[in-house]
Image: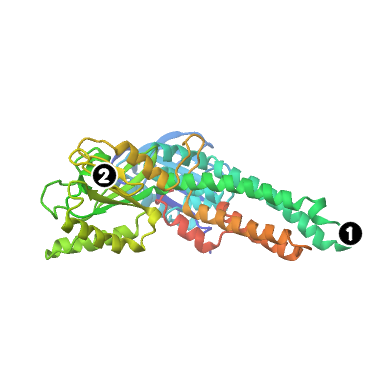
Amino acid sequence: MLSQRQAPIAAIATAPGRGAVGIVRVSSAQDLAPLINAICARSLRAREASYLPFLDGQGLAIDQGLALLFPAPHSYTGEHVLELQAHGGPVVLQLLLARCIEAGQALGIRLAEPGEFTQRAFLNGKLDLAQAEAVSDLIDASTEAAARSAGRALAGALSKEVGELRDALIKLRMLVEATLDFPEEEIDFLQQADAMGRLARLQERLAAVLDRTQQGALLREGIKVVLAGQPNVGKSSLLNALAGAELAIVTAVPGTTRDKVSQTIQIEGVPLHISDTAGLRDTDDEVERIGVARSWEAIEDADVLLFMHDLTRVGQAAYEAEDKLIAARLANVPAERILQVFNKTDAAQVAGLPDGALLLSTKSGVGLAELRQKLLQQVGWHATTEGLFIARERHVQALKRTREHLDLALGVARQVPPALDLLAEELRLSHDALGEITGNFSADDLLGEIFSKFCIGK
């Protein structure tokens, strides 16, 4: 009896809906000749497209299309892979998929789970974990820069950076372990092996990789920006101005926006997930009150909060009192996440504003370019997209743990005499954290979490 991981799998590999072409894919560690004979009524030559009818159980044609066989190990998954390219109608593809499962009963074929083809590619050494994740990121890319960066990660850009760090770390670990194994040699480890210098250079390289990885994570994850403030300060107008479209209703009536309105735009290829929230105020309107509550939830989850003010009302007692109440509730939000934005410079004099305040007019567009750049600076974006690879937050966290253990290792190395067993342990922990990125030290539950978010058929 084959295990779940060993059983042949089949799935529709193209997106749901109608299309010119649709693909059904099968992957199996076993010979697929019985399945191919049942569906194609003939054998297939490796990596050569054959135009033929796809037959059902009664020998009638379901459709006519192209059949391709990729024998192991020269396939995407590293197993024998069969691809049937038919017309892209949902019913045709479902019939073809059902036929594959029916004809492959003797092989134990089953429907693939989300991401299982790519998971097998990882388990069979065709891709490392960072490259496997890049497959999903390439499919999900929301900007051109993200797509190009995902392509670089899939080609191994991130894996190469991590591999070079790993190789340097392994050499250092070997020297420490050798010194522990042969203490009678009385080698002055720190001087003879230049441990301090090696550690320092390793930290410098790690810092550079971490910086690039953080930039890549921004390309993938984007920035969550929330517009907040009293009613009628220009939040909806700013959302429309940044998006270049009339997404939110703009009127002079307070409380027009009663729920969160969101839009994703891009600045220099970085996705910005912008949310316009209901005006923050006390209200007797039940619907608006729910919207205000949701506004506060969005504020807590924001990477950047634009606290918007109306310059035409600055100095008015009632308006200032409400702004102070909002500011008091924002006391729990880290100050570095808040940008003070003063709107309507086209209609009011500017004087006595706090340091760092951003001035703009959503009506005339003055200050919008500066705001876009400030948003990028706020989250640490500084790289050009040329040569950048896409990354995930888990990669960033793994590199940060690597850095923490290297810092501890350096502290141990500076002791006189150094505790080489502690140094060896910190280097091992650093190595383990680094290995999580490419999958060398990944637990099964982590793999399940990653691949479950892939689409079926990939």
Residue drawn at x 12%, y 63% is: 285
Residue 433 placement: quadrant: bottom right
Residue named by callout 2: 351
Q: Quadrant of residue 14?
A: top left
Residue at horizontal 18 percent and vertical 56 percent from the top: 319
**Residue placed most toward the observer, 356 or 429:** 356
Dot in front, 1 or 2: 2
Per the image, label 1 sits on a secondary structure element best described as: helix
At label 2, counting other C-alpha atoms closer than 10 Å, the crowd grade (few under 14, some 14-19, many 20 or more) is few
Q: Is residue 438 left or right of residue 20?
A: right
Mark 1 vs 2, N-terminal side: 1
Q: Are marks 1 and 2 in contact (CB under 8 Å)?
A: no
**212 over 420 or under it: above or below:** above
Is 157 on the left or on the right of 105, as rendered?
right
Quick check: can you spot residue 218? yes
Q: CA distance from mark 1 to mark 2?
A: 74 Å
Helix, strand or loop under label 2: loop
Q: Callout 2, which amino acid?
A: Ala
Q: Position of residue 354 (x, y in %)?
A: 32, 49
Q: Position of residue 43 (x, y in %)?
A: 50, 40
What residue does disc 1 label?
185
Q: Nearer the viewer, residue 169 or 375?
A: 375
Amino acid type of disc 1? Answer: Glu
